[in-house]
Image (spheres, rainbow, N blue to C red):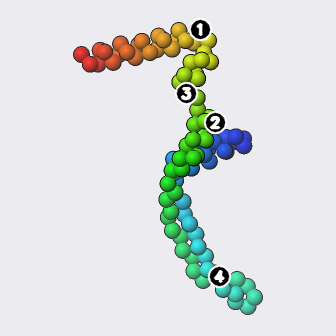
Amino acid sequence: MNEEDKIKKALLKKALGYNADEVVEEYAIDNGEPVLLKKKVTKKHYSPDINAVKVLLAKYYKTYEEKISLMSDEELFEEEARLLKLLKEEESDDC
């Protein structure tokens, strides 16, 4: 996985919110060596972050209008046919 994919994945995780374990460990020194006394694991929920959503949308997702402006004539005709087909299906489902 390249760096940009890692960034996109991290932004998506932050944008959607996630759960994680929070670990707190307490140590004491015994004969010059650290000894684990207590370990507490807590489930923590991180809420979605609107700033991550904004960055994700601005950087990685184009609006429908932007996609159309980049289409060739052939692609536009194909998209028109696809949309007309969807409209016909919707009309037949309504009857």
At numbered mark 1, what does the secondary structure look like: helix, strand or loop? Answer: helix
Q: CA distance from mark 4 to mark 3?
A: 53 Å
- Let me know if residue 16 appears in the view: yes
> What's under tag 2, amino acid-wise?
Lys
Estimate the x, y position of residue 91 in percent, counting from the top left: 31, 15
At numbered mark 2, what does the secondary structure look like: helix, strand or loop? Answer: helix
Q: Relative to 30, say whether 42 is above or below.
A: above
Which residue is label 1 attached to? 73
Residue 7, quarter of the rendered image: top right
Q: Are marks 4 and 3 in contact (CB under 8 Å)?
A: no
Identify the mark nearer the N-term, 2 or 1. 2
Estimate the x, y position of residue 59 in percent, counting from the top left: 63, 36
Q: CA distance from mark 3 to mark 1?
A: 19 Å
Say which of marks 4 and 3 sits in front: 3
- Let me know if residue 19 appears in the view: no
Q: Which residue is more in the foreground, 50 or 25? A: 50
Q: CA distance from mark 4 to mark 1?
A: 68 Å
Estimate the x, y position of residue 1 in percent, counting from the top left: 70, 42
Instruction: Report the residue at 50% width, 54% height from top.
Output: 47
At numbered mark 4, what does the secondary structure look like: helix, strand or loop? Answer: strand
Which residue is label 4 attached to? 27
Count neighbours of disc 2 (C-alpha within 10 A) and say few if under 14, some if 14 to 19, many if 20 or more.
Answer: few
Q: Quadrant of the C terminus?
A: top left
Count neighbours of disc 3 (C-alpha within 10 A) and say few if under 14, some if 14 to 19, many if 20 or more.
Answer: few
Residue 76, quarter of the rendered image: top right
Which residue is label 2 attached to? 59
Q: Which residue is more in the foreground, 25 or 13? A: 13
Say which of marks 4 and 1 sits in front: 1
Q: CA distance from mark 2 to mark 3?
A: 11 Å
Disc on res. 63? 3
Identify the mark nearer the N-term, 4 or 1. 4
